[in-house]
Image (cartoon, helix red, strand yellow):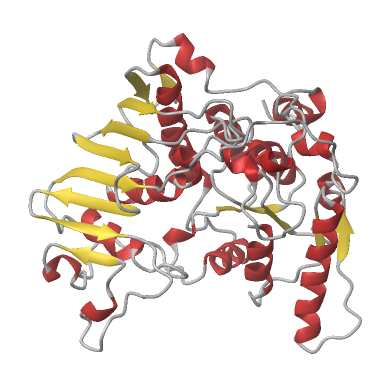
Amino acid sequence: MGRSDLRNTMSEPLARVVAVCDLDSKRLAAGKKLAEDFYANQGESGVTVKAFHNYRDVLASPEIDAVVITVPDHSHALVAIEAAIAGKHVYLEKPVTYTIAEAIALRKVVESTRIILQTGSQQRSVRPWASFRPASEAVRNGRIGQLRTIKIGISIDKPFGIKPAPMSVPENLDYERWLGSAPERPYMEGRVHPQNSLNGRPGWITTEEFGLGMITNWGAHHLDIAHWAMAQECGGPLTVEARAAYPKNDLMTSHENYHVEMLYPGKVKVIFDHKFPKGLRFEGDEGWVFCTRSDETEVVYKKDGQLDRAAMQSLQASNPGILSPLGEKARRWMPSKSHFGNWLESIVANQQPIAPIQQSARTLEGCCAAWIGMKLKRKLNWDAATEMFIGDDAANALRERKARKPEYDYILAMKRAGIV
């Protein structure tokens, strides 16, 4: 996502990329070249983009106003918290943090420093996928009657069929800093990122010490839209029941098959299952709506305001009236054609972006609660007001993880800044 987010940022007229940062010197050099080539192709000459090894040097630079954070999930909280403390505005990939406690802490720091943080929940913006906004607006405005069930499909990770085996750390990678707050683990290329490709899917996504698997990876995208549709942007489930299969003696350590059922206020049932089609299906008393991603089709409105059925594979409903234009008094989402553009415009206007931490923290809590349910294999009761499990010490213990070393402890960073 680093290279993709870099391109998206540079394409926005309000942004000027002046530096890149990476702990892998190969990727750092490639990122620097990507940025310099972009501006050279715009007709500029003699462009120099700075290259940093340590993100703390980036945060110390007075010429930098904002940062895009695309580090592995387990390092999201520390880097974002320190960036906010340094007064930098933040674009942070989802899931916003690795643990529930980190999400709560990040929200507190953002509110204390008053920086603008945009979460990478780009399904909230028109580009590149336009189906999620009209689907969730239709549900929010009662077009399918009383909402009863949301079925969410988020794909599945499969074991590699490769046994874990420690390897020598490449000279170009600072593995100690890459591990950061995570537990001490031997280096394995298949659990970090490819050394012979810039675009290969990184192994940390399927390594539970670094990322919790599909339930937070893709789950953060779709549960975010579900929260929008059922007016739970700052709420959460009442109960969680989950089960999942885990590989044995495999390079992959995160979950594979999964089934999660969460009960929300209003008796709305949210179900995740690996057998469901990718996307969200909202079912109500008076119909249903389905939305998903599609790179081949767009949601197109004709001149008369009606949706073009020929371009609607990514957006479907039980009857056309459900997706007809909403009235003037309907609940509508903030305009946002470009997710990165919305972030930059929000910085200039000093206003909340379309995917603020107050809402993405709640999405993370729901996804993490599902993961905790997978680990404990029993029903859990969640209190959205206190952001804790009710009467369950074992579940609450999994809301956080102790940092491996003080250098990587976000709590100490907050205390040094006087934010406790």
* Residue 208 percent location from the top left of the image: 58, 31
Residue at horizontal 72%, vertical 51%?
Answer: 194
Q: Position of residue 318 (x, y in %)?
A: 13, 62
Q: Is residue 252 above or below residue 13?
A: above
Look at the image and tell me in which quarter the N terminus lies: bottom right
Q: Count up the numbered dots.
A: 0
Residue 237 at x, y percent in the picture = 33, 31
Q: In the image, 29: left or right of 251?
A: right
Reply above or below: 395 against 207. Answer: above
**Residue visible at 63% across and 66% down?**
348
Residue 376 found in image quarter:
top left
In screen coordinates, is 378 left or right of 212?
left
Q: Quadrant of the C terminus?
A: top right
Q: Would residue 308 be visible to someone looking at this image?
A: no
User: Which one is nearer the viewer's eye here, 188 or 83?
Assistant: 188
Can residue 52 be spotted in the picture?
yes
- Quadrant of the image occupied by residue 298: bottom left
